[in-house]
Image (tube, rainbow, N blue to C red):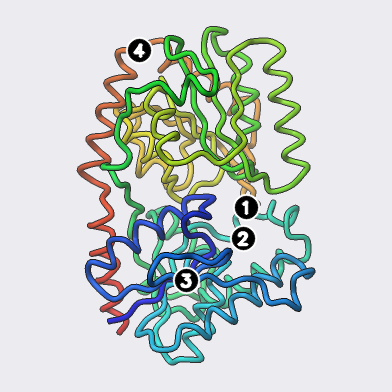
Amino acid sequence: MRVDLLTREYPPEVYGGAGVHVEYLARDLRRLVDTRVRCIGAPREEPGVTAYGVPPGLRDANPALRTIGTDLEMADGCAGADLVHSHTWYANLAGHVAKLLHGVPHVLTAHSLEPLRPWKAEQLGGGYALSSWAERTAFGAADAVVAVSARMREDVLRCYSAVDPARVHVVHNGIDTGEYRPDRATDVLERHGIDPSRPCVVFVGRITRQKGLPHLLRAAQTLDPAVQLVLCAGAPDTAEILAEVRLLVDELARSRDGVVWIQQMLPKPDIVQLLTHATVFACPSVYEPMGIVNLEAMACETAVVATATGGIPEVVSDGETGVLVPIEQLEDGTGTPLDPTRFEADLAAGLTDVLADPVRAREMGVAGRRRAVEVFSWAAVATRMLDVYRAVL
C-alpha cells in the first residue's frame, strides 16, 4: 500500500500542531506502509518528501488562491498512490482533487475547522470564503474523516451536517516521549535571561486569536511579582494582533520584571528545556481541537493550566496533571469568552493555585508524563490510522 500524506507544514517548516502531527505520523507510518509526503514550501532533501511552491502566475494573488494553485500541482503528483490523506484546509483540496483525478480514496484529518475560526477573515480577507469552500467540499466527499478528539468529532458533525457520522473516526494526536522528556540543563534559560531559581509560567504558541495570548497577558497582571512569564510566541496572523500583544507585553513589563518574549522559532531541544523548567505551562486557548502542546509539556513533567475547551479535557486530567480553567463562550464560532474578565480572573487563579504549591506542581508534572507515555504514543496513532485506511480501500 502506498499512502501520500498531503500537508502545508512539514519539517523544517512547522508552525503548529498539524505540522507536528504529520511529522511523527509519517515517521511511524513508514514502518508499516510505503509513505510519501507532499508539502508546501521550500524544497526538502528528505527521501520520499516533495515540496510544492506557488505557481508563478499566482505569486501576487490572495494567499488562499495561492494555496489552491499549489494544491492542484500537489494533486497531480499523487499519481500512483493507493490512498491520499490530507491535513488542514491548506491541503484538503489537493486530497479531494487527487481522489477525483486518480480514483483513490481520500482520508482527511480535522485539526481545526474554518467555521470555528472566523477570525481568519482578518488574515485572508476574501480568501476566507475560498478556504471555507475548499474545506467544506473536501469534507463532504472524503471517504473518511479523522478527528483528533471526541470534541472535534462533535464539531465536524455540527459544522458539516451532510457528513455521515459513520465516516468520522477519532484518533488522538500523539507525543514522542523520547524526544519530549525532562532536560535539567540550564544553558537555554541562561541564553534568554531566564532565572532557573524563580517560578516560571511558560507559553508556547502562535500569535493568533485561537491561542488566547492576550487573555494570558491580562491574567498575568495579578500574578506574584516573583513569577517569570516566558512567551515563545511568534508567527502572528495579522499586524493587528501582533500590535495588541506587543502593547500588552510592554504594559506588563512596566509593572514587573521577568517578562521574556522569544519571538523567533526555537529548535525543539530548546523548547524541551524551557518546558522542563517551567513551574507551570499555560494554555489559554479559546479554540483547541486537542492541543498537542499540552502533551509536550506533560511529557516534560510540567503541570498544565489550560482552558476547558475543545479536546483539551481529553488530554489534561483536571486535578491530576494540571488545572482546567472554566470558560463560557459565544456560539458564533469565535470561541470568545462571554465574560473575558471572569475568564482571565479564573485563568490567573488557576496559575496562582499551582504556583503556590511547588510540591503539588511537581506531582502533577510526574503524573502528566506518566499519562503521556501510557496513553499517547505515535506508534499507536499510526496503527489506528492504518485501520482507517484499510476500512476505505
Per the model, the C-alpha gap separating discs 4 and 3 is 43 Å
- In the rendered image, which residue does mark 4 sit on? 358
Image position, residue 391 (x, y; %): 27, 78
Outermost residue to the left = 374
- Front position in the image: 250 or 286: 250
Work out whether mark 3 precedes mark 1 in sequence or the reverse, and give the earlier one. 3
Image position, residue 371 (x, y; %): 25, 38
- In the rendered image, which residue does mark 2 sit on? 115
Neighbor class of circle 3 (other Cα within 10 Å; few <14, some 14-19, many 20+) is many
* Residue 6 marker: 3
The kind of residue tagged 2 is Pro
- Front position in the image: 315 or 308: 315
Per the model, the C-alpha gap separating discs 3 and 2 is 21 Å
Question: Is the C-beta separation of discs 4 and 3 under 8 Å?
Answer: no
Q: Name the residue located 43 percent from the left edge and 14 percent from the top edge.
A: 196
Q: Name the residue located 49 percent from the left edge and 54 percent from the top edge.
A: 12
Per the model, the C-alpha gap separating discs 1 and 2 is 6 Å
Choose mark 1 or mark 4, whichever is in front.
Answer: 4
Would you say 264 lies left or right of 95 here? Answer: right
